[in-house]
Amino acid sequence: MTRKVRWALAGTASAVALVVGVAVGISIGGDSEQKGPGCAVSAKLVPECGRWWGVAPGVFTNKSTERALADWEDKTRRPADAVHLYHRDGEIFPTDREIAMARDGGRPRLLFLNWKPELGRTWAQVAAGDPAVDQHIDDVARRIRDVYPDRFFLAVHHEPEEEVRPAPGSGFTARDYAAMVRYVIKRLRAGGVDNAVTVMAYMGVPNWGAQPWFNDLYPGDDVIDWVAADLYADKWVNDFATLVNKTRPDYPAWPGFYEWASKRFPKKPLMLAEWGTVNRKNDPDFSRRFFASVPRQLPSYPRLKGLLYFESPKTPVGDTRWNATGASANAFRKVVEMPDFNRLTPP
């Protein structure tokens, strides 16, 4: 989602950042890889086989997170491994509600905390050690250390591309962003947070990927564990293949997210931290066709280890509900039934 969407999400009652998934037999708080009857999952939450399945449920609706998630699971006919929501800066997490969802005895989940920690400061100010932001980071570290030892996903300020101001001294250059993320993650670790599996979440679209500063956004392999993109089936997309490698003729330098990330990060697991179709009024069958392409095409993208759907009737890009029509709902359920998403089960 765009910057406007992120702040709108943060203002809702359900805007708590999570993503979720657990494998059989895994000690999520432990450091070693363990095996269950399904797939092995590493200490960095990378599945040996299969993929995490998740959702940002009921965004921009009046439903509570819990109700929206329950509705999603009931209608898709499969429990979600993951639920993706959002924290804005100033909030301390994980909240009691998050922990309750993560430790639900009927369906335990991994948290994916998506956090903007800047408190109104520039990226450069955060990286330089702004005292107020330092205190906020330390408060979050203390909360995690005291109440949540389990492993979880963490993204620090996802989708930064549209906020970059490339002019030197702006405080918001791509290198300022990378320095800020490095600083925040290292300070968390110094504060005792050794259970965060970090995610770099890009918008991953051609107009930003083609910018000369784009590669400067990356904070470094030592502080990032997974690389993700938030991609939507807009007018440039025909099927799942053209979603994960979205290109545009006016930006010929951008090969698409999956192709770029596979070359740029050959050892990192990849994820769609957000994805979805945009339902088209002038082509009501598009979503069905799009979802029908996923079972055929997803096997060609083995580096994608997690797909977390963004479900909302109203976003700036459009209506992303998977069940806007009965035909699209049936096609989506075929995606849910894929063996890829049925190998990682909770203990």
Image (spheres, helix red, strand yellow):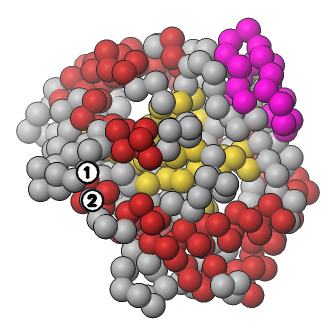
Question: Range of the magenta residues?
Answer: 22-42
Q: Main secondary structure of the magenta part?
A: loop
Q: Amino acid at mark 2?
A: Ala
Q: Amino acid at mark 1?
A: Trp
Question: Which residue occupies 60% across, 86% down?
Answer: 125
Which numbered dot is residue 254? 1
Question: Which residue occupies 51% across, 60% down?
Answer: 218
Question: Residue extending furthest left?
Answer: 282
Say whether marks 1 and 2 touch (CB < 8 Å): yes
Question: Which residue occupies 16% across, 44% down?
Answer: 235
Which numbered dot is residue 210? 2
- What secondary structure is marked by label 1? loop
Residue 132 locus on image (x, y percent): 72, 86
Between residue 86 and residue 30, name the one nearer to us.
30
Q: Is residue 34 magenta?
A: yes
User: Based on the displayed image, in which of its 4 quarters is residue 214 positioned?
Assistant: bottom left
Quadrant of the rendering where the N terminus is positioned: bottom left
